[in-house]
Amino acid sequence: MSVSETSSESEVDILTSSDEDEEPKLNYERTTDKFQGCFLNDSISACVISKEHFLFGSHNGAVYIYTREGVLLRKMILHVATVTSLSVDLESENLASCSLDGKLIVYNISSKETSVYDFKRPLLSVAIDPYYSNRSSRQIICGGRAGKVILSEKGWLGSRDIVLQVDCGTVYKIDWYKSYVSWATDTGVYIYSNEYGKIFGNVDYPKKLPNQEVFPYQLYWQSESRLIIGWADQISIVSIQRSSQPNELPKVSVQAVLEIDSIVSGIMMFDFNILVLAYIAEVEDFTSSSRPRRVDAVRPELRLIDSSFQELAGDVIGLTNYSRLQPSDYHLVSDPAKKDHSYVVFPNDIICARERNEIDHVTYLVSREDYAEAIAAVKTMKDVPPELRVSELGKKYVAHLIDNKQYRKAASVIPTLYVNNPGGWEQWVFVFADHNRLEDVAEYLPLGDDHLSPIIYEMTLANYMALNEKKFNEKLHSWPTNLYSVSTIRKATEKKYEQVPESFLLADSLAFLYVNDNMPVEAFWLYLKLNQKECIDLVFEHNLYDEARQSVLQLLLTSADGHPENVNPKVINMLVQHVHSFPPKEVIRQIESVTRFLYAYFCSYEVMFPNSLMEYGDLKVNVFAEFDRPRLFEFLMNTQCYSLGHAYNVCVKYHYLDELVYVLGRMGNNKDALMLIINELSDIGRAIRYVKEQGDKDLWEDLISYSLDKPDFICTLLENIGSDENAHNLITRIPKGMKLPHAKESLSKLLSDHQLQVYLHLGCHNLFEDEASQKVKKLHSDQNNGFEVDKHIVSQEDNVNELVNFDYSNLSEEPLPFVFDTKTNEFRSISSLGYDIHTLASDNEFRDAASHARNRLKPDLAMSSKLSILMALKK
């Protein structure tokens, strides 16, 4: 970025980065006003900074001493010509200055004591012993155009001068560091050990240049082992290695030489990098005979070069009146009190270059309008200037985004900036409203305890209602109702709904507001109109059974999402449990057209009230036949509250054969039922069981007649026919010559079954005979012998059996038996009960009862008829 020549002294931005997309490495601040006493009224030619003072020398021979705060301690006219160099000891107590007038003056800042050395020839550089205040030798080294390097010190007999080097040409620069002193001359750079009092090394210039006096020599001691030399367009790195041998001088070597595209006007170390003050010009501009010596300059640059000699940054210095300045007019001075500070000094200007801090970084980000990163950086800082606080940066950031129409991004930033500032939050909401962009900020409004004023949410909802009904509905359901006045929004929604009654979203929103405004009845009718399941919840929560009574079918359809197969048992149970609000007759009338609902209702009602709703028997048959066949069969068998004809038609319709057989049986159409089992079900076993259950001889005849031309049926009948008579009838009617499959097995099973019956009857007969014999013996014994009777308990039934089993037909003159009189609880003779023995024996009814009682213990004499079956088979 080019910088105009017409920069004013009020210019604050003195930096232009060589890479505009990269943040500068250094921060620059003009401090001219701080020392305006010298810079406004004089032209600076030399400068030095100590731990406590800023010291300047001018072209008018004046020396200025300032405190670090910029307070002028004193101004002294020590020379009559340009002050060429200043040097101060580490204690900031003694100042040495030299001038073109050939004088070297040492000034004690505290005592104001002055020592003057006059060398008669122009001096260009001076270096005071860093420990001058603490040593009695009071050493000073100076040099100039006399071609000598002179050490001045105080001894026992006064001051003396020691020439350290002669015939070296002009001495341009001297720098003293601890026990080492370096100086630059026309013949090179020399390094002197004050400890040994000898020059132990030198560095020749890589090349000789005409007019080399215009190129300032720069010497900077990084440490005792490293010296950096800058001259013309070259930078040399010199290493000083101490010897391990005693009394052996250190060794000097050049580690590297760097050539740059400008003239070195100042050099120093900045942290681990080399800081170069570059005068932008070619060396040839000052050495070519075809060009004038004075060159119109451009703004100088501060360049930061790393240890691998890669340029990290190059910043143009925005100073004033630079066009006529020469390379030697610039000074780059380090600050021993602040290692991260350095100063670029010009004849009429001074600029502080320092390492950038957090505040500088934030300021740079703000200048680039990178507010998000700036705010993030500020949040990590401890001490923040008022102008860089999050609140201030936030305002600028949001305003910047809005100005660039980035409304959604601006809205997303606000919550992070105004966490504890609801007032600031609300102000931005109104700004968004002015831009008609409330829908952007609405997505980020706080909904928790840190919520804003109700008017903000009401304004936003009103905006949605007018422009976006879908969003309006979404916000109502997602926002807590305590954020706004439900009544206010409800009234506004009612007005809008009156204008647009066909709007589903508005109706749903209004129903939601009714619920939250304690108006459940209105909400119920709206939700019912919209077929929303919320209407069902309202019925349960607010007992709206009377309101729901006339809308049973719609409630069921709504609960099932319009699909009857998804019937909601909760609603069905409600209809059953609240029969007073939902009379069954009314419910059935409404839901009769939807048989699935009717089925569910009947099932649930039966659980609550078994054997009820008998008047709807035929309707139950219909729905059970359609949805629950097992329940249909159970209903047909266990109840009679239906029309047999209707049940018959329903079973025929659905082709339910088992149920149809049962209905035909109940209707008395056993033969049709039998034929249905045989012809439709093809189940001869079931046909046989059915005939046995009915006990109808005509059915046996029908079954046998139907089976005579069906060998498989005949075999099955033979295996299961059971009674002797039916078996005999079947066997005798089998057509001659008919081949029966499995005839042998069927007949074997028949005979086996009948043989087993014979054995059973014979066994029973033997048991009956034994028991009858015992009874006769007991009777005979009882009649001829007395017996002891338990006086407490004698079973009435046992005495009655004795009476019944007694053979009264053979009575003669034997003693009459005693019987137990239940009225008197005593044993008495039959005659005492008022019975005539002959009358009792001739009483047919009594004799039949007695005979029946006896026959219970006799075997069935008809068992011999079983043999007739064998005789039929034999024939």
Image (cartoon, rainbow, N blue to C red):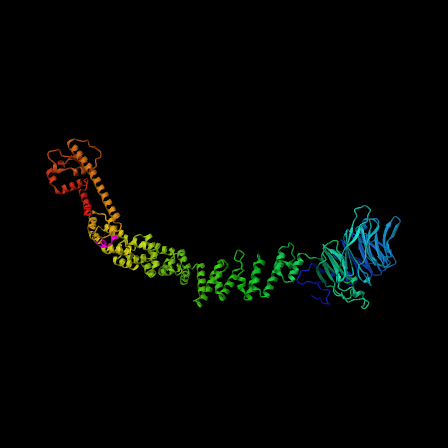
Q: Quadrant of residue 38?
A: bottom right
Please say if 719 is above or below 822: below
Return the x and y of residue 407 as percentages of the image width and height. 56, 64
Q: Nearer the viewer, residue 666 or 601?
A: 666
Return the x and y of residue 312 as percentages of the image width and height. 70, 59
- Whether residue 834 is visible: no
Q: Is residue 707 magenta?
A: yes
Q: Quadrant of residue 187?
A: bottom right
Please say if 118 is above or below 751: below
**What residue span does the magenta drawing correspond to?**
705-711
Please say if 533 is above or below 814: below
Q: How many marks?
A: 0
Q: Nearer the viewer, residue 632 or 797?
A: 632
| Residue lying farthest to the right in this orientation | 157
Q: Residue at 13% x, 36% y: name it.
A: 832
Left-right relation of 647 to 176: left
Return the x and y of residue 52 as percentages of the image width and height. 76, 54
Q: Nearer the viewer, residue 566 or 533?
A: 566
- Whether residue 607 is visible: yes
Q: Nearer the viewer, residue 268 or 71?
A: 268
Q: Quadrant of the N terminus?
A: bottom right
Return the x and y of residue 863 as percentages of the image width and height. 19, 43
Q: Residue at 79% x, 46% y: name it.
A: 244
Q: Quadrant of residue 61?
A: bottom right
Q: Is residue 129 magenta?
A: no
